[in-house]
Image (cartoon, rainbow, N blue to C red):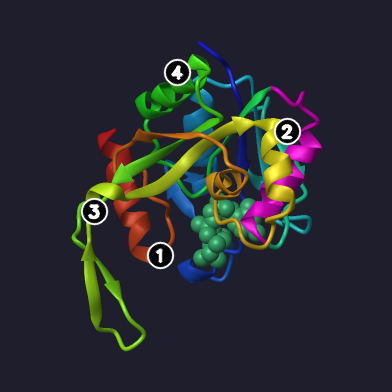
Amino acid sequence: MLKPHLLIPAAGVGSRMKIGYPKQYMPFVDDRNLLETTVWRLSEMTLFASIAVVVSTDDAYIDHCDLPQSVRVLRCGGKTRAQSVYNGLKALELKGDEWVLVHDAARPCVSKQAICRLIERLDLGDVDGAILASPVVDTLKIVNEAGLIEQTVNRELYRSAQTPQGFHVQALIHALADRLQTATDEASAMEAVGAKIAVIDSPVSNIKVTHPDDALLAKFFLQSI
Ligand code: CTP
Ligand code: MG
């Protein structure tokens, strides 16, 4: 099977977690913080040609982390997630036609099976990229500025985008370059340049630890994986 590179953006400030320091360094499970948990899980999957983590230029925590020896730490994070990914991709100096998967440090519960399905899809060679996503279970409403329902939409047409998201390195660098302030994921940048992107079903347990309650839920999911 194809062996893509893995880039893990971890240069955010975690403002919604409200713990006073970046959430990727919050104690998580078995004496590991959130970042260590995510990196070790992905490393032990043995699916990647290389793994690199992007942290902010003034990060004061990463030197105290226990990460696998082969993991590269890139101190080149930016103000937005897109900027961090862009800077990280440039720093990696990979060949343009190599595949890279980008995965949030804040998603420790991602399933190996789902990543394998994503890589297999890239390997087929019929798409420009692929992302993990989960079906939407709630009924979806469009709501106006007054907080009133405008209409109900067909949820079958919608997916919640997760990570990893995989693309060719050079194509992703090009797409992100013009969208460093606006792209909230890699796929949205690639969509804007007309890329054909496959969506791979992934369990809702691949949550992004964002608010305080999410940490409890993610720890529960990790126990049951
Ligand atoms: N990220 C990053 N660089 C940024 C912003 C985010 O590398 N400038 C990373 C985060 O560290 C995280 C991932 O992108 O692993 C997803 O972002 P998010 O969950 O939004 O984390 P934060 O931006 O840190 O949190 P918040 O939006 O609540 O401040
Ligand atoms: Mg954010």
Q: Label 4: few (<14), some or many (≥20) within 10 Å?
A: some
Q: CA distance from mark 3 to mark 2?
A: 34 Å
Amino acid type, label 3: Arg
Q: Secondary structure at mark 3?
A: helix
The residue segment tinted magenta is 80-97
Q: Position of residue 38 (x, y in %)?
A: 49, 39
Q: Position of residue 167 (x, y in %)?
A: 59, 32
Q: Secondary structure at mark 2?
A: helix
Q: Position of residue 23 (x, y in %)?
A: 53, 59
Relative to residue 21, is residue 65 depicted above or below?
Answer: above
Q: Residue at x 59, y 22 (%)?
A: 4
The first of marks 3 and 4 along the sequence is 4
Q: Which mark is residue 120?
A: 4
Q: Nearer the viewer, residue 33 or 208?
A: 208
Relative to residue 84, is residue 202 depicted above or below?
Answer: above
Horizontal side, residue 50 vs residue 101: left or right: right
Relative to residue 39, is residue 21 depicted above or below?
Answer: below
Q: Nearer the viewer, residue 98 or 34?
A: 98
Q: Label 1: few (<14), some or many (≥20) within 10 Å?
A: some
The first of marks 4 and 2 along the sequence is 4
Residue to which mark 2 is pinned: 170
Q: CA distance from mark 3 to mark 4?
A: 27 Å
